[in-house]
Image (tube, coloured by chain):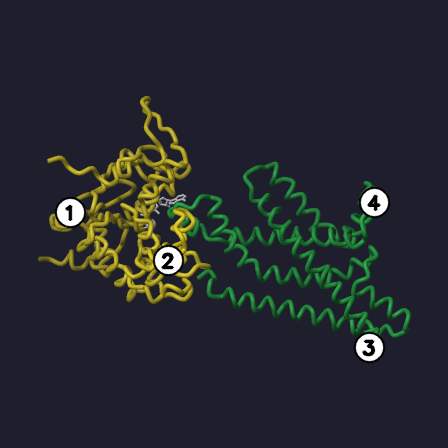
Protein backbone atom coordinates (compact mmCIF):
# COMPACT_ATOMS: atom_id res chain seq x y z
CA UNK A 1 0.00 0.00 0.00
CA UNK A 2 1.34 3.41 -0.95
CA UNK A 3 0.90 6.30 1.39
CA UNK A 4 -1.51 8.95 0.11
CA UNK A 5 0.23 12.11 -1.10
CA UNK A 6 0.22 14.81 1.58
CA UNK A 7 -2.09 17.78 1.13
CA UNK A 8 0.81 20.11 1.79
CA UNK A 9 4.51 19.31 1.59
CA UNK A 10 6.94 21.91 2.90
CA UNK A 11 10.68 21.59 2.26
CA UNK A 12 13.50 23.62 3.85
CA UNK A 13 11.27 26.66 4.14
CA UNK A 14 13.03 29.80 5.37
CA UNK A 15 11.48 33.20 5.89
CA UNK A 16 13.25 36.41 6.80
CA UNK A 17 11.90 39.86 7.51
CA UNK A 18 14.76 42.13 6.49
CA UNK A 19 17.84 40.73 8.22
CA UNK A 20 15.92 38.66 10.76
CA UNK A 21 15.20 35.06 9.88
CA UNK A 22 12.02 33.89 11.62
CA UNK A 23 11.56 30.46 10.02
CA UNK A 24 14.72 28.37 9.87
CA UNK A 25 14.24 25.57 7.37
CA UNK A 26 10.83 24.06 8.06
CA UNK A 27 10.21 20.51 6.81
CA UNK A 28 6.63 19.48 7.27
CA UNK A 29 3.95 17.37 5.64
CA UNK A 30 0.28 17.97 6.27
CA UNK A 31 -1.83 14.83 5.97
CA UNK A 32 -4.92 14.89 3.80
CA UNK A 33 -8.27 14.63 5.56
CA UNK A 34 -6.82 15.31 8.98
CA UNK A 35 -6.77 18.21 11.42
CA UNK A 36 -3.27 19.42 12.16
CA UNK A 37 -2.85 21.83 15.05
CA UNK A 38 0.07 24.21 15.08
CA UNK A 39 1.00 25.27 18.59
CA UNK A 40 3.92 27.09 20.12
CA UNK A 41 4.97 30.14 22.10
CA UNK A 42 4.17 33.63 20.90
CA UNK A 43 6.62 34.71 18.23
CA UNK A 44 7.63 31.16 17.34
CA UNK A 45 6.50 31.69 13.73
CA UNK A 46 3.10 29.95 13.58
CA UNK A 47 1.32 32.78 11.76
CA UNK A 48 4.27 33.31 9.45
CA UNK A 49 4.28 29.64 8.47
CA UNK A 50 0.51 29.61 7.90
CA UNK A 51 0.70 32.80 5.84
CA UNK A 52 3.46 31.29 3.72
CA UNK A 53 1.21 28.30 3.05
CA UNK A 54 -1.53 30.74 1.99
CA UNK A 55 1.05 32.66 -0.08
CA UNK A 56 0.12 35.84 1.78
CA UNK A 57 3.83 35.94 2.59
CA UNK A 58 6.53 34.86 0.19
CA UNK A 59 9.04 32.49 1.70
CA UNK A 60 12.67 33.54 1.32
CA UNK A 61 13.70 30.06 0.22
CA UNK A 62 12.38 26.52 0.14
CA UNK A 63 9.34 25.01 -1.54
CA UNK A 64 5.72 24.38 -0.75
CA UNK A 65 3.67 21.82 -2.67
CA UNK A 66 -0.10 22.15 -2.31
CA UNK A 67 -2.04 19.15 -3.54
CA UNK A 68 1.16 18.19 -5.40
CA UNK A 69 1.44 21.56 -7.15
CA UNK A 70 4.23 24.06 -6.43
CA UNK A 71 2.90 27.20 -4.77
CA UNK A 72 4.27 30.53 -5.93
CA UNK A 73 7.72 29.32 -6.88
CA UNK A 74 9.00 26.36 -8.82
CA UNK A 75 12.34 24.70 -8.24
CA UNK A 76 14.32 24.57 -11.48
CA UNK A 77 16.87 21.98 -12.61
CA UNK A 78 19.76 24.18 -11.46
CA UNK A 79 18.23 24.39 -7.99
CA UNK A 80 17.17 28.01 -8.30
CA UNK A 81 13.54 28.94 -8.02
CA UNK A 82 11.40 30.71 -10.51
CA UNK A 83 8.28 32.71 -9.72
CA UNK A 84 5.23 31.11 -11.29
CA UNK A 85 2.85 33.16 -13.41
CA UNK A 86 -0.01 34.84 -11.54
CA UNK A 87 -2.62 32.58 -13.14
CA UNK A 88 -0.85 29.44 -11.83
CA UNK A 89 -0.54 30.98 -8.38
CA UNK A 90 -4.23 31.80 -8.31
CA UNK A 91 -5.14 28.31 -9.47
CA UNK A 92 -3.11 26.55 -6.79
CA UNK A 93 -4.32 29.00 -4.18
CA UNK A 94 -7.94 28.35 -5.10
CA UNK A 95 -7.58 24.99 -3.34
CA UNK A 96 -6.90 26.79 -0.05
CA UNK A 97 -9.29 28.68 2.20
CA UNK A 98 -8.26 30.84 5.11
CA UNK A 99 -9.97 31.96 8.30
CA UNK A 100 -8.38 34.89 10.11
CA UNK A 101 -8.20 35.86 13.76
CA UNK A 102 -9.89 39.20 12.94
CA UNK A 103 -12.59 37.54 10.73
CA UNK A 104 -11.90 40.09 7.96
CA UNK A 105 -15.48 40.11 6.75
CA UNK A 106 -16.23 42.83 4.20
CA UNK A 107 -18.24 45.34 6.26
CA UNK A 108 -20.32 46.75 3.41
CA UNK A 109 -21.80 43.37 2.47
CA UNK A 110 -24.34 41.23 4.32
CA UNK A 111 -23.41 37.81 5.64
CA UNK A 112 -24.81 36.26 2.48
CA UNK A 113 -23.06 38.91 0.35
CA UNK A 114 -19.75 37.97 1.92
CA UNK A 115 -20.31 34.30 1.21
CA UNK A 116 -21.46 34.78 -2.39
CA UNK A 117 -19.06 37.57 -3.45
CA UNK A 118 -16.38 35.38 -5.01
CA UNK A 119 -18.99 32.97 -6.43
CA UNK A 120 -20.40 35.85 -8.48
CA UNK A 121 -17.32 38.02 -9.10
CA UNK A 122 -14.72 35.29 -9.60
CA UNK A 123 -16.65 32.20 -10.63
CA UNK A 124 -19.32 34.05 -12.59
CA UNK A 125 -22.32 32.26 -11.08
CA UNK A 126 -25.72 33.93 -11.38
CA UNK A 127 -26.95 35.77 -8.28
CA UNK A 128 -29.67 33.18 -7.77
CA UNK A 129 -27.36 30.18 -7.98
CA UNK A 130 -24.73 31.87 -5.82
CA UNK A 131 -27.47 32.76 -3.33
CA UNK A 132 -28.56 29.15 -3.06
CA UNK A 133 -25.04 27.92 -2.56
CA UNK A 134 -24.34 30.70 -0.09
CA UNK A 135 -27.44 29.88 1.95
CA UNK A 136 -26.40 26.22 2.04
CA UNK A 137 -23.04 27.23 3.53
CA UNK A 138 -24.65 29.55 6.06
CA UNK A 139 -26.96 26.70 7.05
CA UNK A 140 -23.89 24.55 7.57
CA UNK A 141 -22.55 26.98 10.19
CA UNK A 142 -26.03 27.53 11.67
CA UNK A 143 -26.52 31.10 10.46
CA UNK A 144 -29.23 30.83 7.83
CA UNK A 145 -31.39 33.24 9.83
CA UNK A 146 -28.65 35.89 9.85
CA UNK A 147 -28.08 35.95 6.08
CA UNK A 148 -29.30 39.53 5.65
CA UNK A 149 -27.35 40.95 8.58
CA UNK A 150 -24.27 43.07 8.16
CA UNK A 151 -21.07 42.11 10.01
CA UNK A 152 -21.55 45.04 12.41
CA UNK A 153 -24.86 43.45 13.45
CA UNK A 154 -23.36 40.05 14.30
CA UNK A 155 -21.54 38.80 17.39
CA UNK A 156 -17.87 37.88 17.07
CA UNK A 157 -18.67 34.18 17.06
CA UNK A 158 -21.29 34.67 14.36
CA UNK A 159 -18.88 36.75 12.29
CA UNK A 160 -16.25 34.04 12.48
CA UNK A 161 -18.80 31.42 11.42
CA UNK A 162 -19.74 33.59 8.43
CA UNK A 163 -16.02 33.80 7.60
CA UNK A 164 -15.85 30.00 7.70
CA UNK A 165 -18.91 29.77 5.43
CA UNK A 166 -17.27 32.25 3.06
CA UNK A 167 -14.18 30.07 2.83
CA UNK A 168 -16.24 26.87 2.45
CA UNK A 169 -18.32 28.30 -0.39
CA UNK A 170 -15.28 28.14 -2.67
CA UNK A 171 -14.96 24.41 -1.93
CA UNK A 172 -11.32 24.44 -0.86
CA UNK A 173 -9.43 21.20 -0.33
CA UNK A 174 -7.53 22.71 2.58
CA UNK A 175 -8.68 25.17 5.26
CA UNK A 176 -6.18 27.24 7.22
CA UNK A 177 -7.13 28.86 10.54
CA UNK A 178 -4.98 31.45 12.31
CA UNK A 179 -6.15 31.63 15.93
CA UNK A 180 -9.80 31.67 14.89
CA UNK A 181 -11.08 32.13 18.45
CA UNK A 182 -8.38 34.41 19.85
CA UNK A 183 -10.41 37.62 19.49
CA UNK A 184 -13.64 36.13 20.83
CA UNK A 185 -15.14 36.39 24.28
CA UNK A 186 -14.64 33.06 26.07
CA UNK A 187 -18.36 32.22 25.93
CA UNK A 188 -18.31 32.50 22.11
CA UNK A 189 -15.33 30.30 21.36
CA UNK A 190 -17.39 27.12 21.74
CA UNK A 191 -19.71 27.79 18.79
CA UNK A 192 -16.74 28.33 16.46
CA UNK A 193 -14.77 25.35 17.73
CA UNK A 194 -17.88 23.17 17.29
CA UNK A 195 -18.19 24.16 13.64
CA UNK A 196 -14.50 23.33 13.16
CA UNK A 197 -14.93 20.00 14.90
CA UNK A 198 -17.80 19.13 12.53
CA UNK A 199 -15.65 20.03 9.54
CA UNK A 200 -12.90 17.77 10.84
CA UNK A 201 -15.41 14.95 11.23
CA UNK A 202 -16.49 15.46 7.62
CA UNK A 203 -12.90 14.85 6.55
CA UNK A 204 -11.82 18.42 5.75
CA UNK A 205 -8.06 18.93 5.71
CA UNK A 206 -7.39 21.64 8.27
CA UNK A 207 -4.33 23.40 9.62
CA UNK A 208 -5.21 25.24 12.81
CA UNK A 209 -2.95 27.65 14.65
CA UNK A 210 -4.43 27.77 18.11
CA UNK A 211 -3.82 28.47 21.75
CA UNK A 212 -6.86 26.34 22.63
CA UNK A 213 -4.82 23.40 23.88
CA UNK A 214 -7.93 21.45 24.86
CA UNK A 215 -9.22 21.69 21.28
CA UNK A 216 -5.83 20.72 19.85
CA UNK A 217 -5.60 17.69 22.09
CA UNK A 218 -9.11 16.41 21.36
CA UNK A 219 -9.72 17.40 17.73
CA UNK A 220 -6.18 17.54 16.35
CA UNK A 221 -5.01 14.29 14.83
CA UNK A 222 -1.55 15.71 14.58
CA UNK A 223 0.18 18.31 16.72
CA UNK A 224 3.08 20.35 15.42
CA UNK A 225 4.98 22.24 18.11
CA UNK A 226 6.90 25.19 16.75
CA UNK A 227 9.67 26.82 18.78
CA UNK A 228 11.92 29.67 17.67
CA UNK A 229 11.08 29.17 14.01
CA UNK A 230 11.72 25.41 13.99
CA UNK A 231 9.47 22.35 14.17
CA UNK A 232 10.47 20.98 17.54
CA UNK A 233 7.88 18.23 17.83
CA UNK A 234 5.46 16.62 15.40
CA UNK A 235 3.19 13.72 16.28
CA UNK A 236 -0.24 12.56 17.39
CA UNK A 237 -1.47 14.29 20.56
CA UNK A 238 -1.57 11.08 22.60
CA UNK A 239 2.16 10.67 22.03
CA UNK A 240 3.21 14.29 22.35
CA UNK A 241 1.22 15.22 25.42
CA UNK A 242 1.83 12.01 27.35
CA UNK A 243 4.77 11.86 29.72
CA UNK A 244 7.66 11.77 29.33
CA UNK A 245 7.05 15.08 27.70
CA UNK A 246 9.59 17.33 26.02
CA UNK A 247 10.59 19.94 28.61
CA UNK A 248 9.93 22.87 26.22
CA UNK A 249 6.40 21.56 25.62
CA UNK A 250 5.76 21.17 29.35
CA UNK A 251 7.00 24.70 29.93
CA UNK A 252 4.70 25.95 27.14
CA UNK A 253 1.66 24.03 28.44
CA UNK A 254 2.13 25.47 31.91
CA UNK A 255 1.38 28.93 30.52
CA UNK A 256 -1.93 27.73 29.05
CA UNK A 257 -3.53 26.03 32.03
CA UNK A 258 -6.75 27.97 31.45
CA UNK A 259 -7.08 26.82 27.84
CA UNK A 260 -7.45 23.14 28.55
CA UNK A 261 -3.79 22.42 29.19
CA UNK A 262 -4.41 21.72 32.87
CA UNK A 263 -6.10 18.45 32.00
CA UNK A 264 -3.00 17.33 30.08
CA UNK A 265 -0.60 18.24 32.84
CA UNK A 266 -2.40 16.75 35.82
CA UNK A 267 -0.63 13.64 37.11
CA UNK A 268 -2.37 10.45 36.09
CA UNK B 1 -38.92 93.72 -0.72
CA UNK B 2 -41.34 92.91 -3.47
CA UNK B 3 -42.21 89.39 -4.46
CA UNK B 4 -40.48 89.95 -7.79
CA UNK B 5 -37.17 90.84 -6.15
CA UNK B 6 -37.40 87.87 -3.80
CA UNK B 7 -37.98 85.69 -6.83
CA UNK B 8 -34.76 87.07 -8.33
CA UNK B 9 -32.91 86.12 -5.16
CA UNK B 10 -34.36 82.59 -5.22
CA UNK B 11 -33.36 82.15 -8.85
CA UNK B 12 -29.84 83.30 -8.02
CA UNK B 13 -29.76 80.81 -5.15
CA UNK B 14 -30.77 78.11 -7.64
CA UNK B 15 -27.89 79.15 -9.87
CA UNK B 16 -25.48 78.93 -6.94
CA UNK B 17 -26.73 75.41 -6.22
CA UNK B 18 -26.31 74.35 -9.86
CA UNK B 19 -22.74 75.70 -10.06
CA UNK B 20 -21.80 74.10 -6.74
CA UNK B 21 -23.36 70.71 -7.47
CA UNK B 22 -21.71 70.59 -10.90
CA UNK B 23 -18.34 71.51 -9.38
CA UNK B 24 -18.64 68.89 -6.63
CA UNK B 25 -19.61 66.24 -9.20
CA UNK B 26 -16.87 67.07 -11.68
CA UNK B 27 -14.47 67.50 -8.77
CA UNK B 28 -15.32 64.02 -7.47
CA UNK B 29 -14.63 62.44 -10.85
CA UNK B 30 -11.37 64.33 -11.30
CA UNK B 31 -10.54 63.66 -7.65
CA UNK B 32 -10.93 59.91 -8.17
CA UNK B 33 -8.52 60.06 -11.11
CA UNK B 34 -6.02 62.18 -9.19
CA UNK B 35 -6.28 59.87 -6.19
CA UNK B 36 -5.74 56.82 -8.41
CA UNK B 37 -2.69 58.53 -9.93
CA UNK B 38 -1.33 59.37 -6.48
CA UNK B 39 -1.73 55.74 -5.36
CA UNK B 40 -0.19 54.43 -8.56
CA UNK B 41 3.15 52.62 -8.45
CA UNK B 42 4.20 54.59 -11.55
CA UNK B 43 6.17 57.73 -10.68
CA UNK B 44 5.18 59.51 -13.92
CA UNK B 45 1.54 59.36 -12.72
CA UNK B 46 2.24 60.03 -9.06
CA UNK B 47 4.40 63.06 -9.62
CA UNK B 48 2.00 65.24 -11.68
CA UNK B 49 -0.84 64.29 -9.32
CA UNK B 50 1.24 65.53 -6.41
CA UNK B 51 1.92 68.83 -8.19
CA UNK B 52 -1.79 69.18 -9.02
CA UNK B 53 -2.81 68.69 -5.39
CA UNK B 54 -0.22 71.07 -3.95
CA UNK B 55 -1.05 73.78 -6.47
CA UNK B 56 -4.81 73.72 -6.01
CA UNK B 57 -4.57 73.41 -2.24
CA UNK B 58 -1.84 75.98 -1.92
CA UNK B 59 -3.11 78.87 -4.04
CA UNK B 60 -6.18 80.84 -2.87
CA UNK B 61 -9.32 80.00 -4.83
CA UNK B 62 -9.80 83.66 -5.71
CA UNK B 63 -6.37 83.79 -7.35
CA UNK B 64 -7.07 80.46 -9.13
CA UNK B 65 -10.31 81.84 -10.56
CA UNK B 66 -8.68 85.05 -11.78
CA UNK B 67 -5.77 83.05 -13.25
CA UNK B 68 -8.04 80.67 -15.16
CA UNK B 69 -10.34 83.48 -16.30
CA UNK B 70 -7.40 85.39 -17.76
CA UNK B 71 -5.33 82.39 -18.86
CA UNK B 72 -7.97 80.75 -21.07
CA UNK B 73 -8.43 83.71 -23.46
CA UNK B 74 -4.63 84.25 -23.46
CA UNK B 75 -4.14 80.78 -24.92
CA UNK B 76 -6.96 81.33 -27.38
CA UNK B 77 -9.80 79.58 -25.54
CA UNK B 78 -12.83 81.80 -25.40
CA UNK B 79 -15.48 80.48 -23.05
CA UNK B 80 -18.35 82.02 -21.12
CA UNK B 81 -17.32 83.17 -17.67
CA UNK B 82 -19.46 80.47 -16.05
CA UNK B 83 -17.24 77.81 -17.66
CA UNK B 84 -14.11 79.46 -16.27
CA UNK B 85 -15.82 79.53 -12.87
CA UNK B 86 -16.74 75.83 -13.12
CA UNK B 87 -13.20 74.86 -14.13
CA UNK B 88 -11.74 76.78 -11.19
CA UNK B 89 -14.16 75.45 -8.57
CA UNK B 90 -13.99 71.87 -9.90
CA UNK B 91 -10.21 71.66 -9.98
CA UNK B 92 -9.92 73.20 -6.53
CA UNK B 93 -12.39 70.79 -4.93
CA UNK B 94 -10.86 67.91 -6.93
CA UNK B 95 -7.56 68.44 -5.13
CA UNK B 96 -9.23 68.29 -1.71
CA UNK B 97 -11.43 65.35 -2.63
CA UNK B 98 -8.44 63.43 -3.98
CA UNK B 99 -6.75 63.80 -0.60
CA UNK B 100 -9.92 62.77 1.26
CA UNK B 101 -10.25 59.69 -0.92
CA UNK B 102 -6.61 58.82 -0.41
CA UNK B 103 -7.23 58.88 3.32
CA UNK B 104 -10.23 56.61 2.79
CA UNK B 105 -8.23 54.11 0.79
CA UNK B 106 -5.44 54.15 3.35
CA UNK B 107 -7.98 53.30 6.07
CA UNK B 108 -9.20 50.08 4.43
CA UNK B 109 -7.80 47.38 6.73
CA UNK B 110 -5.21 45.18 5.04
CA UNK B 111 -6.87 42.02 6.31
CA UNK B 112 -9.97 42.71 4.21
CA UNK B 113 -7.78 42.63 1.11
CA UNK B 114 -6.01 39.48 2.25
CA UNK B 115 -9.43 37.85 2.56
CA UNK B 116 -10.19 39.05 -0.98
CA UNK B 117 -6.87 37.62 -2.14
CA UNK B 118 -7.78 34.25 -0.63
CA UNK B 119 -11.18 34.42 -2.32
CA UNK B 120 -9.42 34.77 -5.66
CA UNK B 121 -10.42 38.35 -6.49
CA UNK B 122 -8.04 40.00 -8.96
CA UNK B 123 -6.52 43.38 -8.07
CA UNK B 124 -9.09 45.15 -10.25
CA UNK B 125 -11.97 43.16 -8.73
CA UNK B 126 -10.66 44.00 -5.28
CA UNK B 127 -10.58 47.68 -6.19
CA UNK B 128 -14.08 47.66 -7.61
CA UNK B 129 -15.82 45.45 -5.07
CA UNK B 130 -13.92 46.01 -1.81
CA UNK B 131 -11.50 48.94 -1.73
CA UNK B 132 -13.50 51.61 -3.58
CA UNK B 133 -16.86 50.99 -1.84
CA UNK B 134 -15.28 51.01 1.63
CA UNK B 135 -13.10 54.05 0.87
CA UNK B 136 -16.10 55.96 -0.51
CA UNK B 137 -18.16 55.17 2.59
CA UNK B 138 -15.34 56.35 4.81
CA UNK B 139 -15.18 59.55 2.75
CA UNK B 140 -18.89 60.50 2.96
CA UNK B 141 -18.53 62.84 5.99
CA UNK B 142 -15.59 64.63 4.38
CA UNK B 143 -17.53 64.87 1.11
CA UNK B 144 -20.47 66.56 2.84
CA UNK B 145 -18.04 68.96 4.48
CA UNK B 146 -16.46 69.72 1.13
CA UNK B 147 -19.89 70.32 -0.45
CA UNK B 148 -20.70 72.94 2.18
CA UNK B 149 -17.32 74.62 1.73
CA UNK B 150 -17.79 74.77 -2.05
CA UNK B 151 -21.33 76.17 -1.71
CA UNK B 152 -19.93 79.01 0.33
CA UNK B 153 -16.80 79.42 -1.81
CA UNK B 154 -18.96 79.66 -4.93
CA UNK B 155 -19.68 83.26 -3.90
CA UNK B 156 -16.14 84.01 -5.15
CA UNK B 157 -17.04 83.27 -8.78
CA UNK B 158 -18.77 86.66 -8.95
CA UNK B 159 -15.26 88.12 -9.54
CA UNK B 160 -15.19 86.53 -12.99
CA UNK B 161 -18.62 87.95 -13.79
CA UNK B 162 -20.95 85.12 -12.84
CA UNK B 163 -24.18 86.52 -11.39
CA UNK B 164 -24.88 84.03 -8.60
CA UNK B 165 -26.50 84.59 -5.23
CA UNK B 166 -23.91 86.90 -3.66
CA UNK B 167 -23.56 89.06 -6.77
CA UNK B 168 -27.33 89.31 -7.15
CA UNK B 169 -27.65 90.47 -3.54
CA UNK B 170 -24.93 93.06 -4.19
CA UNK B 171 -26.70 94.34 -7.30
CA UNK B 172 -30.08 94.58 -5.61
CA UNK B 173 -28.59 96.17 -2.51
CA UNK B 174 -27.01 98.86 -4.67
CA UNK B 175 -30.10 99.58 -6.74
CA UNK B 176 -32.58 99.59 -3.85
CA UNK B 177 -30.33 101.15 -1.17
CA UNK B 178 -31.34 98.30 1.15
CA UNK B 179 -28.06 96.39 1.70
CA UNK B 180 -29.03 95.00 5.10
CA UNK B 181 -32.18 93.43 3.76
CA UNK B 182 -30.64 91.77 0.72
CA UNK B 183 -27.51 90.53 2.48
CA UNK B 184 -29.68 89.08 5.24
CA UNK B 185 -31.80 87.27 2.69
CA UNK B 186 -28.65 86.00 0.91
CA UNK B 187 -27.22 84.77 4.21
CA UNK B 188 -30.50 83.06 5.07
CA UNK B 189 -30.61 81.32 1.71
CA UNK B 190 -27.00 80.03 2.05
CA UNK B 191 -27.86 78.78 5.51
CA UNK B 192 -30.99 77.01 4.29
CA UNK B 193 -29.16 75.31 1.43
CA UNK B 194 -26.38 74.11 3.74
CA UNK B 195 -28.90 72.79 6.24
CA UNK B 196 -30.36 70.67 3.50
CA UNK B 197 -26.92 69.43 2.45
CA UNK B 198 -25.96 68.60 6.03
CA UNK B 199 -29.31 66.87 6.56
CA UNK B 200 -28.81 64.84 3.39
CA UNK B 201 -25.33 63.88 4.57
CA UNK B 202 -26.68 62.75 7.94
CA UNK B 203 -29.30 60.64 6.17
CA UNK B 204 -26.65 59.08 3.92
CA UNK B 205 -24.50 58.23 6.93
CA UNK B 206 -27.52 56.69 8.65
CA UNK B 207 -28.22 54.63 5.55
CA UNK B 208 -24.62 53.38 5.46
CA UNK B 209 -24.46 52.71 9.18
CA UNK B 210 -25.27 49.02 8.90
CA UNK B 211 -22.34 48.46 6.59
CA UNK B 212 -19.79 50.38 8.64
CA UNK B 213 -16.38 49.04 9.59
CA UNK B 214 -16.87 47.13 12.82
N1 LIG C 1 5.66 41.75 9.03
C1 LIG C 1 6.67 41.46 9.86
N2 LIG C 1 7.80 42.18 9.85
C2 LIG C 1 8.82 41.90 10.69
N3 LIG C 1 8.81 40.91 11.57
C3 LIG C 1 7.72 40.14 11.64
C4 LIG C 1 6.59 40.37 10.79
N4 LIG C 1 5.64 39.45 11.08
C5 LIG C 1 6.15 38.69 12.06
N5 LIG C 1 7.40 39.09 12.40
C6 LIG C 1 8.27 38.46 13.42
O1 LIG C 1 8.38 37.10 13.12
C7 LIG C 1 8.35 36.31 14.29
C8 LIG C 1 7.24 35.26 14.18
O2 LIG C 1 6.00 35.93 14.21
P1 LIG C 1 4.62 35.18 14.08
O3 LIG C 1 3.57 36.20 13.99
O4 LIG C 1 4.70 34.18 13.00
O5 LIG C 1 4.54 34.43 15.47
P2 LIG C 1 3.34 33.59 16.09
O6 LIG C 1 3.91 32.26 16.46
O7 LIG C 1 2.18 33.60 15.18
O8 LIG C 1 3.04 34.40 17.42
P3 LIG C 1 1.63 34.69 18.14
O9 LIG C 1 1.30 33.47 18.95
O10 LIG C 1 1.94 35.86 19.03
O11 LIG C 1 0.63 35.01 17.09
C9 LIG C 1 8.17 37.27 15.45
O12 LIG C 1 9.43 37.47 16.03
C10 LIG C 1 7.66 38.53 14.80
O13 LIG C 1 8.11 39.65 15.50
MG1 LIG D 1 0.22 34.50 15.26
Of B13 and B54, the residue lying toward us? B13
Q: Which residue is mark 2?
A: A131
The residue indicated by pointer 1 is A236
**Disc 2 from disc 1: Cα separation:** 40 Å
Q: Is residue A260 left or right of residue B160?
A: left
Q: Position of residue A259 (x, y in %)?
A: 24, 59
> Between disc 2 and disc 1, whose residue precedes?
2
Q: Provide the letter of the chain coloured green.
A: B
Mark sitting on residue B124: none
Report the residue that reaches farthest toward the top. Answer: A78
Give the residue at the far left of this rendering.
A268
Of B143 and B2, which appears nearest the observer? B2
Labels 2 and 3 share a subunit: no
Q: Position of residue A254 (x, y in %)?
A: 21, 55
Question: In the rendering, what colour is chain A?
Answer: yellow
Residue bearing mark 3: B3
| SS assignment at label 3 | helix
| Label 4: element kind | helix
What residue is pinned by disc 4? B73
Asked if residue A50 lies left or right of residue B4, the reply is: left
Callouts 2 and 3 close, C-beta under 8 Å? no
Q: Is disc 1 in contact with disc 4, using a CB cutoff of under 8 Å?
A: no
Q: Is residue B1 visible?
A: no
Pointer 2 chain: A
Kindly report the distance in space between the C-alpha atoms of the residues bearing marks 2 and 3. Answer: 59 Å
Local SS, label 2: helix
Decide which of tag 4 and tag 3 comes sooner along the chain: 3
Q: CA distance from mark 1 to mark 3?
A: 90 Å
Would you call the spot at circle 1 few (<14 residues within 10 Å), some (14-19), or many (20 or more)?
some
Amino acid sequence: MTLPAPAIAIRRLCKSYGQTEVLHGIDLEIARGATTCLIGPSGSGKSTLLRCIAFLEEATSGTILVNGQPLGFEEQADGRRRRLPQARIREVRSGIGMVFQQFNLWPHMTALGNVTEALVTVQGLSRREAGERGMAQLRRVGLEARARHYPSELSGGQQQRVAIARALALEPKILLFDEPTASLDPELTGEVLNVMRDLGDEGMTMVVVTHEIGFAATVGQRIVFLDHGRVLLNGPPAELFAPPRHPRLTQFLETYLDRGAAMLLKPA
Amino acid sequence: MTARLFELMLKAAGYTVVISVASIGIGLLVGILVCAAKLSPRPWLRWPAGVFVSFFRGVPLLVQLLLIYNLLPAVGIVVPSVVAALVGLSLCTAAYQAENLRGGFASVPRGLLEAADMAGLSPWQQFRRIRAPIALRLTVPALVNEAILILKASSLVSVVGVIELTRTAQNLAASTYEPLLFYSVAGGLYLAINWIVAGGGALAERGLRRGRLA
